[in-house]
Amino acid sequence: MQTLIQHWSAAIRDKDIEAIMAYYDPEIVAYDAIIQLQFKGIEAYGKHWEFCLGMCPGPMIFEQSELVVHGDQQLAFAHWLNSCGGADEKGEMKSSWMRASAGFRRTAEGWKAVHEHFSAPFDMESGKALFDLKP
Amino acid sequence: MQTLIQHWSAAIRDKDIEAIMAYYDPEIVAYDAIIQLQFKGIEAYGKHWEFCLGMCPGPMIFEQSELVVHGDQQLAFAHWLNSCGGADEKGEMKSSWMRASAGFRRTAEGWKAVHEHFSAPFDMESGKALFDLKP
């Protein structure tokens, strides 16, 4: 599972949409950190990924920390902290820590992510997402 | 799993901290919607639950929608949209939709949640959590 997640992360940093989407099951239900409550199915989530990659024209940071995997023969779930970032307008790399959870099923095409959840926690008083938290 | 989640939700609405915490494994790693990146272990998460319940002195809304469960004999994970709310200063009930993911293991004490992730997506321009999204 660790290798699967590492390959997918490399595909994200390479902005290789085909390799990114090969990680997902057609029936993926995703809760992304931004914009919508949920994305249902690989077509909707693929469009969202293309939108997200379009926002990051330069080099990207996308790395895992504190990965925990629970798995057996047919089913697995994992969670980790994800360092996400990219170059700002001045070309300086900026990143923040997000939280990620994922669920996987073994299929005829190998392990596929059927669920994904990315988020940043928010501050209750301001209602703003907290981007400066450290593990 | 649906019944387990329903009993836990009833315990939350009843503000029964003992019944809420009986749902979790001692090694729970939780990503809550607010304040911190993560909570590790039942003691830290129990303190956070007490803090959260303390913020809601009146009646609470805590209901599931669109629950999906993937499970086998020893392992399960689930995700759903969660309507969360309570009475405001004028006594009016207000709620918003959050996203929830959870992972479970069968233990000697029955099924226990070993992972939990709650969040609201945020708006990229304002950085603010989005509380008015509907499923």
Image (cartoon, coloured by chain):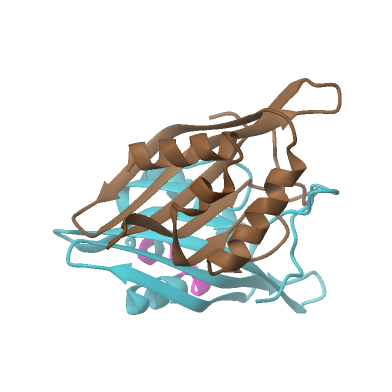
Chain colours: A brown, B cyan
Q: Residue at x 67, y 29 (%)?
A: A95
Q: Nearer the viewer, residue A70 or A30?
A: A30
Quadrant showing the N terminus of chain A? top left
**Residue furthest out toward the left:** B108
The image position of residue B67, as x and y in percent, is: 46, 76
Please indicate whether residue B17 sits to the left or right of residue A60 in the image: left
Q: Nearer the viewer, residue B16 or A64?
A: A64
Q: Residue at x 73, y 54 (%)?
A: B122
The image position of residue A35, as x and y in percent, is: 73, 59
Q: Which residues are magenta?
A: B12-19
Q: Is residue A34 above or below residue A98?
A: below
Tally of numbered discs: 0
Q: Residue at x 67, y 72 (%)?
A: B86
- The reply to whether residue B8 is in sight is yes
- The reply to whether residue B50 is in sight is no
Asked which quadrant contains residue B57, the reply is bottom right
Please indicate whether residue A2 sits to the left or right of residue B106 in the image: right
The image position of residue A93, as x and y in percent, is: 72, 23
Main SS of the magenta segment? helix
Asked which quadrant contains residue A36, the reply is bottom right
Q: Is residue B121 above or below residue A38?
A: above
Q: Nearer the viewer, residue A113 or B27?
A: A113
Q: Is residue A110 above or below residue A134?
A: below
